[in-house]
Amino acid sequence: MDSLITAAARALAAGDPLGALNRVALRDDAPALALRGIAMAQLGEFERAKVLVRSAARAFGSKAPVARARCIVAEAEVALASRELSWSATRLDAARAMLEARGDRVNGAHARYLDIRRLLLIGQIDEAETRLAEIDPMPLPPALKTTHHLIVAGIAMRRLQTKAARAALEQAERAAHEAGIAALAAEVTSAFDLLNLPAARLIANDAERVLLLEEVEALLNSNTFVVDACRHVVRQKNEAITLATRPVLFMLVRALAEAWPEDASRDELVARAFRARHADESHRGRLRVEIGRLRRLLRSLAEINATPRGFALTLHHAHELVVLAWPVEEKHADVLALLADGESWSSSALAIALDTSQRTVQRALDSLAAARKVQSFGRGRARRWTMPLVPRFTTVLLLPASLPVD
């Protein structure tokens, strides 16, 4: 490897993409193409980076399997940064196996971290944690140690383990400082922000206040009866009853909770659950049926009693009842939660992350675009979506599989 390639590689390792490009910008040999691709990725030019890295992999070919495997890892990193979540995990795993077999354990670990970060992004928390446990970060360079601790913190935040998350971020901060890479330090700072921004709204007794993530954790660990509008779950201590697939029942229990300790009128319940302006006998009959279903589901935690005006909740063991709601009420909050990371997403990547159809996501994006809450650039398969302004609240509670329900 010649001196210019070596100098460019060192510049990239130190987080200096412009310095790397100054040395290899006019070269088209395989090592230079790979370094140019990585530099363009660090500058945010993901489409160009992808083309360059793929060209480098072809140029290396089968005669340089290790270099080709490194290009595949770099391509996966570009895909993750540009939120293209449909890239082949099998191809990345094959590249990782090649690197580890040839003694390149640093890039092999980097490949593992990319796969784990993708799993975390799409909500497969248990699998991400299992794979992370297979990696010993101690012999790795500071940059990869930073990545390791950031993933640990991400898993902890998704599970509302804020003390563990804060401890992991402190380790990540030390590793990033040792690495001396500004982009890594900024990523750690952004992760710390999630712990210090409003995470949810608490609604109780006709009053509201915002909660930080650690306050949400304390609330869910208390004996309070919680109607969790972030995940459509009713919780108390270690018991959770999910109503994620029963939207009518959840609207009923939320209306009853917001009225507690008083009752909620039948007309109000019909309006909230069935979106009917005027309650007729058919609505009242349906209300009785749905209340009966809700009563059976909640029987271990509370009773639903009929009153002259409507229905009221009576708690079995809890003395407090609250509603936990999103910081900002929004029909498509799950889409906004992913876009709030500041990256540009394709509709297909959003569909993968949310485990829903691309058409459903596209309808949500069209609705949000009409309200000027999101914006797009590019056309066809290159079209990407972003938020004009990132909201100043953490969206951890809105992300896929962020809270345990059992």
Image (cartoon, rainbow, N blue to C red):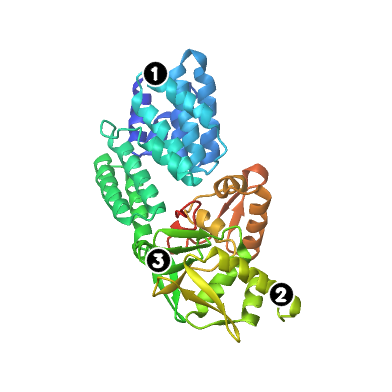
- Amino acid of disc 2: Gly
Q: Residue at x 49, y 57 (%)?
A: 340
Q: Residue furthest bottom?
A: 308
Would you place residue 297 above or below residue 60 in this image?
below
Can residue 26 be seen here? The reply is no
- Amino acid of disc 3: Pro
Q: Secondary structure at mark 3?
A: loop
Asked which quadrant contains residue 375, the reply is: bottom right
Mark 1 to mark 2: distance in Å?
68 Å
Image disc number at residue 101? 1
Seen from the viewer's position, the closer of residues 246 and 139 is 246
In percent of width and height, residue 182 lies at: 32, 46
In percent of width and height, residue 109 lies at: 37, 30
Q: Secondary structure at mark 2?
A: helix
Left or right side of 258 for 158: left
Left or right side of 10 for 91: right
- Say whether disc 2 or disc 3 marks the residue closer to the N-terminus: 3
Q: Residue at x 47, y 41 (%)?
A: 119
Count residues near mark 1 (Cα–Cα under 10 Å), then give few for <14, some for 14-19, many for 20+: few
Tag nearer the camera, 2 or 3: 2
Tag nearer the camera, 1 or 2: 2
- Amino acid of disc 1: Ala
- Say whether disc 1 or disc 2 marks the residue closer to the N-terminus: 1
Residue behind mark 2: 285
Mark 2 to mark 3: distance in Å?
41 Å
Would you place residue 203 above or below residue 112 in this image?
below
Residue behind mark 3: 198
Q: Secondary structure at mark 1?
A: helix
